[in-house]
Amino acid sequence: QVQLVESGGGVVQAGGSLRLSCAASGRTFSSYVMAWFRQAPGKEREFVASSRWSGIDYADSVKGRFTISRDYTKNTVYLQMNSLKPEDTAVYYCATTYGSRWPTSIDYWGQGTQVTVSS
């Protein structure tokens, strides 16, 4: 059974930093894309960043502030978030999908972790 467990969310002041972690279990994820999405209140879920064998991608809104990294030995993906803004407030979700199905579909979602940035 595949599980994605996020951690690291919390409350931080604008300009601060947080590091999210997502530990994946249940299979080998080396051929899978691992990604972060977020959903703010009243808004649709949106892409934040992804890591795959061919490279890394970021949403324009987080470029230069967020960094995604991946530890293949631990099946874990991280999201380092710096220079946080109030508009980054959202529930952050870890997601994974087999490489050829990205970005058309997502195979698995985590339960989400709340990030709140106060002004």
Image (cartoon, rainbow, N blue to C red):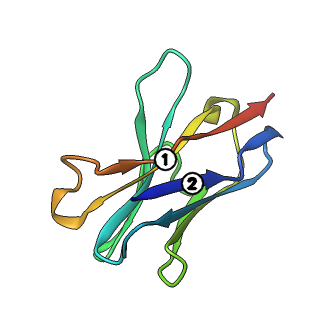
- Quadrant including the N terminus: bottom left
Where in the figure is residue 113, as x and y percent of width and height? 63, 41
User: In the structure shown, which secondary structural element does the residue marked by tag 2 occupy?
Assistant: strand
| Labels 2 and 1 touching (C-beta < 8 A) | yes
| Label drawn at residue 110 | 1
Counting residues from the start of the chain, the first of labels 2 and 1 encountered is 2
Q: Residue at x 47, y 66 (%)?
A: 25
Residue projecting furthest to the front: 1
Query: Taking 118 as reference, is 17 above or below it?
Result: below
Q: Amino acid at mark 1?
A: Gly
- Quadrant including the C terminus: top right
User: In the structure shown, which secondary structural element does the residue marked by tag 1 occupy?
Assistant: loop
At label 1, counting other C-alpha atoms closer than 10 Å, the crowd grade (few under 14, some 14-19, many 20 or more) is some
Where in the figure is residue 26, as x and y percent of width and height? 41, 67
Q: Amino acid at mark 2?
A: Val
| Label drawn at residue 50 | none
Numbered circles on residues, count:
2
Can you identify the residue that label 2 sits on? Answer: 5
Q: Residue at x 57, y 63 (%)?
A: 67
Cα gap from disc 2 to disc 1, whole angstroms: 6 Å
Query: Taking 16 as reference, is 1 above or below it?
Result: below
